[in-house]
Image: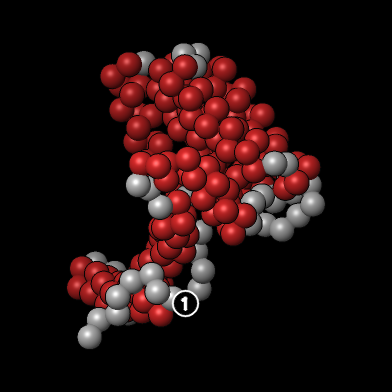
Amino acid sequence: MRGHGFLLANYVPGTSLIHRAPLALKFLLVFGCGLASFIIVDWRMSAAVLAALSGLFLLSGTGLKKLWGAIRPLAAVLLVIGVFQWWMLGAPTAARIVLNITVCVVAASLLTATTPVQRLLDGVVKTAAPFKRFGADPERFALTIGIMLRSIPYIAGTFADVRDSARARGLERNPRALVLPVFITSVAFARQTGEALAARGLGEAEN
């Protein structure tokens, strides 16, 4: 099964300033971009922020292909949102909304492209540690994120492979030829993941 990216860019090893930046600073960048998406009301400001983030992405050495790969899965959705908002609220508002969504995706992708997954999960554990007093389990929270980061690209890749296989057999319009193999593969993947967690004392194996 070939690998497939999904929404966020995968980690690309490097020694750039952005790779070596403190994880807390990267978290703040993502948080700040998310906050800015609610505050910015001028599409030109949104475009400037996106241009700055894109510049950081390219300076990190991860490449233009990675940047486009982070945006491409959302392109159709952004187009629909943009057209609808243009019809309802006008072109400037539509541009601002689409640009702000793109800013959030690029900021998150900059984080994942320049931070190893294990370091990212360790940062999540450290950030969530204060919530232990409320009964939260930071390790399990980080584990959940780790499983999600692994599962979504796997399932997306499975669907793409099944779709290509069905197209080669002339069955691309047959729902059973698309849904059933993906469902079976996903269930098998979930069982394997559950058994691996149980073997590490993180769950109970089925009898």
Q: Which quadrant of the figure has residue 168?
A: bottom left
Toward the viewer: 144 or 8? 144
In the image, residue 116 sits, relative to residue 166, either above or below, namely above
Q: Position of residue 139 (x, y in %)?
A: 46, 56
Judged left or right of residue 79, residue 116 is right
* Image location (x, y in percent) of residue 202: 38, 70
Q: Residue at x 50, y 73 (%)?
A: 2
Whole-percent x and y of residue 7? 47, 50
Of residues 12 and 206, the one drawn nearer to the viewer in this rendering? 206
Left or right: 76 with respect to 187? right
- In the picture, residue 190 is in which quadrant? bottom left
Label 1 environment density (alpha carbons within 10 Å; few <14, some 14–19, many ≥20) = few
Which residue is found at the position 56% from the left and 17% from the top?
44
**Residue at point 49%, 17% (across, down):** 40
Q: Give the tally of numbered discs.
A: 1
Check the image and name the residue furthest to the bottom. 207
138 relative to 180, above or below? above
Please say if 14 is above or below 180. above
Query: Can residue 7 be seen at all in this image of the molecule?
Result: yes
- Regarding residue 103, the answer to whether it shows in the image is no
Give SS at disc 1. Answer: loop
How does the figure colour the protein chain or chains? secondary structure
> Is 196 placed left or right of 190 in the picture?
right
Q: Residue at x 49, y 45 (%)?
A: 129
- Residue kind at label 1, given as amino acid type: Met
Q: Nearer the viewer, residue 27 or 52?
A: 27
Check the picture and name the quadrant holding the C terminus.
bottom left
Q: Measured from the top left, where is residue 100 in percent x and y?
A: 48, 28
Judged from this view, the residue extending furthest toward the front is: 133
Q: Identify residue for label 1.
A: 1
